[in-house]
Image: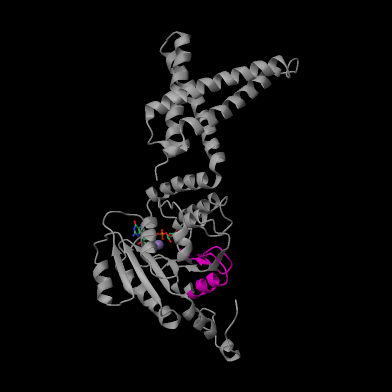
């Protein structure tokens, strides 16, 4: 990035460590839309507007602030109106609730070339936004206000549980990105990149992570921030939201690792089927049914539970298809798979593995593996076809 600071400018440091030349440069560079999702943040609204206003006066006159409020009905609308600022507006949604979908809604309505997302409870310091814009200008695609890079921190009152929670979530998202703080809800990106993002899934509250993965950003920068504890109001992230995050993660894994992930789930469901089979077998034996019936009962039960779990989890994209047709297909593929399993085991046992110690077990194992792969491919590409995907 070329500097336009004169030697005199260089001497005058700003509170956020920037020179006037850089500030002037930002001014020409960017029209910025800050989107703040809010739910019952009436006390915080005037405070955050005041802090953003200072940044705006300093170097970002072309800045609009959009609150996306999910019908808090706590006087938030009136609080924004009372300010009477033409660069601040509030969108009230009455038909939906959720942090991520609120942010997406706000980004779509934004007019700026640069989009910034931040919390409404003053946890995120708007003072670093100019630095974020400079980073975008120097070629970064996504800029995060980060707690976990040198210089970043969180306020001390973070309970151990919340800290642990944040850390575990960060580790679970490591396969997608090496970013230190992918859970951050404070970030900036270009409007054009956002508009190009295909099939965003606004489940849960980790919209930043969703964007990093779905937009396939390679140049992600992190700017250290101090994450302040909220003073007014309370956190909206319930246990339900945390569980939603697991759902979100699973979808991201499928998105990023496609078939490998489908296969892993298919195998896990298969393993759970063994447990179901044995449980039912034990139950029926306890009921003193004939052994042949007990064995059959175990198989049928595991076939059904495998089918339902695969339909709901492994191939969830196809769960709107006709369940009966899918069940017939599943049983068909599974019986074929069983025959493939048997055939491969018989063949190997009679040829390659003949006379080898434990050859029969090795043959059985090869049969099982081939059967599993066969089953998987049959189900993935014939029974639960992608054409069932409903967007
Ligand atoms: N519109 C809307 N709808 N806004 C919401 C909703 C909702 O359903 N739920 C929460 N918000 C708003 C809050 O009003 C606040 O402005 C912001 O989203 C963050 O919510 P908090 O309840 O303060 O979340 P937090 O402090 O626990 O979580 C923060 O830290 C996480 C990292 O640990 C947020 O920054 C998250 O984005 C971040 O991922
Ligand atoms: Mn908060």
Q: Image point 39% across, 59% down: which residue?
A: 104
Q: Which residues are magenta?
A: 130-157
Instruction: Say above or below: 11 vs 106.
Output: below
Q: Answer with the quadrant where ligand 1 appears in the image.
A: bottom left
In screen coordinates, is 2 left or right of 289? right
In screen coordinates, is 89 left or right of 52? left
Instruction: Say above or below: 289 vs 177.
Output: above
**Residue 147 percent across, percent down from the top left:** 52, 64
For the question of whether residue 158 can be seen, the reply is no
Tell me if residue 137 is in the magenta stretch: yes
The picture quadrant where one finds residue 344 is: top right
Tell me if residue 168 is in the magenta stretch: no
Identify which residue, 151 or 193, lies in the foreground: 193
Hey, which residue is sitting farthest front in the picture? 387
The picture quadrant where one finds residue 230 is: bottom left
**Residue 270 percent across, percent down from the top left:** 52, 29
Quarter of the picture holding the N terminus: bottom right
Instruction: Say above or below: 21 vs 294.
Output: below
Q: Image point 59% across, 82% down: which residue?
A: 3
- Give the color scheme: rainbow, by chain, secondary structure or one colour: one colour
Instruction: Say above or below: 369 vs 202.
Output: above
In screen coordinates, is 40 left or right of 222? left
**Residue 53 percent across, percent down from the top left:** 38, 78
Count of residue discs = 0
Identify which residue, 122 or 100, lies in the foreground: 100
For the question of whether residue 247 can be seen, the reply is yes
The picture quadrant where one finds residue 102 is: bottom left
Hey, which residue is sitting farthest top in the picture? 290
Hey, which residue is sitting farthest bottom in the picture? 8
Q: Image point 47% across, 56% down: which residue?
A: 197
In screen coordinates, is 59 left or right of 352? left
């Amino acid at each position: 990035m070329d500097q336009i600071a004169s030697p005199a400018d260089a001497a005058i440091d700003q509170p956020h460590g920037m020179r006037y030349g850089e500030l002037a440069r930002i001014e020409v560079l960017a029209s910025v839309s800050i989107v703040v999702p809010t739910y019952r943040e009436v006390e915080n609204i005037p405070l955050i507007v005041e802090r953003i206003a200072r940044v705006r006066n300093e170097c970002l006159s072309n800045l609009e602030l959009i609150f996306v409020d999910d019908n808090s009905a706590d006087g938030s609308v009136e609080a924004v109106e009372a300010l009477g600022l033409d660069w601040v507006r509030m969108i009230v949604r009455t038909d939906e609730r959720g942090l991520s979908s609120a942010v997406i809604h706000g980004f779509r309505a934004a007019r700026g070339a640069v989009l910034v997302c931040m919390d409404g409870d003053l946890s995120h310091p708007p003072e670093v936004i100019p630095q974020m814009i400079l980073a975008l200008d120097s070629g970064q695609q996504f800029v995060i206000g980060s707690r976990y890079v040198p210089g970043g921190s969180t306020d001390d009152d973070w309970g151990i549980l919340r800290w642990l929670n944040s850390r575990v979530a960060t580790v679970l998202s490591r396969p997608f990105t090496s970013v230190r703080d992918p859970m951050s809800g404070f970030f900036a990106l270009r409007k054009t990149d956002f508009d190009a993002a295909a099939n965003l899934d606004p489940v849960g509250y980790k919209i930043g992570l969703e964007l990093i993965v779905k937009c396939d950003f390679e140049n992600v920068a992190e700017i250290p921030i101090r994450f302040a504890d909220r003073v007014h109001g309370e956190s909206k992230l319930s246990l339900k939201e945390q569980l939603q995050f697991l759902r979100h993660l699973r979808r991201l894994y499928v998105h990023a690792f496609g078939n490998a992930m489908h296969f892993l789930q298919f195998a896990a469901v298969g393993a759970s089927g063994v447990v179901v089979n044995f449980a039912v077998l034990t139950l029926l034996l306890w009921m003193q049914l004939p052994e042949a019936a007990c064995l059959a009962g175990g198989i049928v039960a595991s076939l059904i539970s495998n089918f339902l779990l695969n339909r709901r989890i492994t191939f969830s994209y196809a769960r709107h298809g006709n369940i009966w047709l899918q069940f017939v297909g599943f049983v068909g593929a599974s019986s074929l798979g069983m025959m493939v399993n048997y055939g491969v085991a018989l063949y190997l046992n009679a040829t390659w593995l003949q006379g080898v110690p434990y050859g029969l077990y090795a043959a059985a194992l090869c049969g099982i593996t081939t059967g599993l792969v066969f089953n998987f491919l049959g189900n993935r590409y014939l029974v639960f076809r992608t054409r069932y995907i409903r967007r």
